[in-house]
Image (spheres, helix red, strand yellow):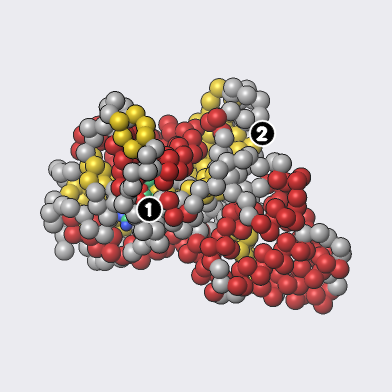
Amino acid sequence: MDGSFATPCAKRTESGAWVGQRGRHTGTWARALGHFFLSRMAPVAVLKESTFGSRRSTARPLRNNGVTWKSSSKKRRVRTPREYALAAKLGQVELARRPFEELSLRIFADTLASCDLPQGPIVEIGAGDGQLRRLLPPAVLPRLVATEPDPAVSRLFRTRHPGVPLLDARAERLPFETASVAAVVGLCVMDVVPDPRAVAREISRVLKPGGCFVHWLDMSPVLDEVIDLLRQAELVSFPNFVSDPSAGEWPEDLYVMSRHGLAIVIELLREAGVSLARPLAEYSAIFCSGASRAATAELIALQENGDLRRALASAFQTAILSAPPGIRAQLASCHAQTVSTARHFDEQMHACFEQAHFDRRSWIERAWQARARTAPERRYRSCLVGEQRHLSFAPQPPLCANAASAADEALIELGVLTFLATRMQD
Ligand SMILES: C[S@@+](CC[C@H](N)C(=O)[O-])C[C@H]1O[C@@H](n2cnc3c(N)ncnc32)[C@H](O)[C@@H]1O
């Protein structure tokens, strides 16, 4: 595996932190499955959730603790451990995005071309270290004014883009006059901000009539909120290991089951002597305990590992097949189903912008390209919000119905959730 595929998939925690799809593993599954599975996981550093601007994080002022590095402007500056951690994490995201850059550029350019924007600045919220800049059409860049509330992230931005304007601002309070902005854009921000409704109100304030808010989500929405809602409904969430998450219009990335149903499955597995019964019981206990973050961490650990998902699928099948008819009927009534976290996020977005003066729509835009294959194992790569895959073969059907590639090519596919709200007259 070369560097560009080192973090094949990235997932985000509630804090907006990104964790490499293979980088995170928590106790339950590691203990239960031991070396066999652990040996298949790349040793990527696990970074603290509070290190990326977040719902719960408190952006602490930077302290000079003596770690220095040379910026591109040749000045001696100080980089704190937190900045190192952020830089590493943003680097992972960039690597995960790299194979899809051309496709992102196409999708983002098409979205902006469909907006008939008035004159004025285009404001980016939650700019991070400025990755959206390279994914937007160059013609847009002179109008783009980036904003970012986290001082450490802002420093990374300024290092990467010296001389590019960046304002220190939260999206809930933008430093622009009322009705002065042509567009507000954001990439993977609205699922992180603590009060999306307040952001919607602020965007409504700064946009000119005819101006647009465009938000793109190219990877997973932050999972904690939806997992917590499901948990409150006494449902235990798993990554979808029962069907192809990408098969529907919306990626059905979670499989949910009632606690009662899962208890039956665990008991059946215990009776059948299947070793997964124990980690499943621990997993279920974490979901019952009310520790949302721990539950999300466990789910991500599962999502990161195809071997574990396959083991679970086969364990569930064993349980169902070994169940006596009466128990099987009970299991059937346990409402196990697949759900889409992207759809949940999309519904939230519509609810935030349902003020009368917004005309809003959203869609998942899919695009593909075939590329010369440089290594035999890199045959297929796809990123669909909530579901990312790196396979040695091209699946049937592919993400894009019309995608095709020759045997010696790699197929790259991308599905971005775009939300577009146009500011009407009041
Ligand atoms: C997941 S990162 C995305 C960064 C960048 N847009 C990208 O996709 O590479 C989320 C960004 O939102 C920022 N953020 C967090 N809370 C925010 C808020 N209330 N207003 C604006 N930005 C916020 C974070 O500091 C972080 O830079």
Give the residue at x 56% y 60%. Answer: 296
Indicate whether 151 appears above or below 135: below
Question: Does mark 1 have its CB less than 8 Å from ligand 1?
Answer: yes
Res. 53 mark: 1
In which quadrant is the C terminus drawn?
A: bottom left
Q: In the structure shown, which secondary structural element does the residue marked by tag 2 occupy?
A: loop
Please state which of residues 80 and 50 is positioned toward the viewer in this rendering.
Answer: 80
Q: Is residue 207 left or right of residue 398?
A: left
> Image point 55% across, 30% down: which residue?
3
Residue 334: image x %, image y %? 68, 73
Neighbours of disc 2 within 10 Å: few (<14), some (14-19), many (20+): some
Vertical order, 230 against 156 (above or below): below
Q: Which residue is mark 2?
A: 392
Residue sitting at x 55%, y 39%: 7
The amino acid type of the residue labelled 1 equals Gly
Using the rendered image of the protein, determine whether residue 110 is visible from the camera's viewpoint. no
Q: CA distance from mark 1 to mark 2?
A: 36 Å
x and y, in percent, of residue 70 in the image: 34, 29
Q: Amino acid at mark 2?
A: Ser
Left/right placement of residue 260 relative to residue 254 reads right
SS assignment at label 1: loop
290 to the left or right of 264: left
Ranked by sequence position, the earlier of labels 1 and 2 is 1
Whether the residues at callouts 1 and 2 have beta carbons within 8 Å, the answer is: no
Q: Position of residue 234 (x, y in %)?
A: 60, 74
Q: Is mark 2 within 8 Å of ligand 1?
A: no
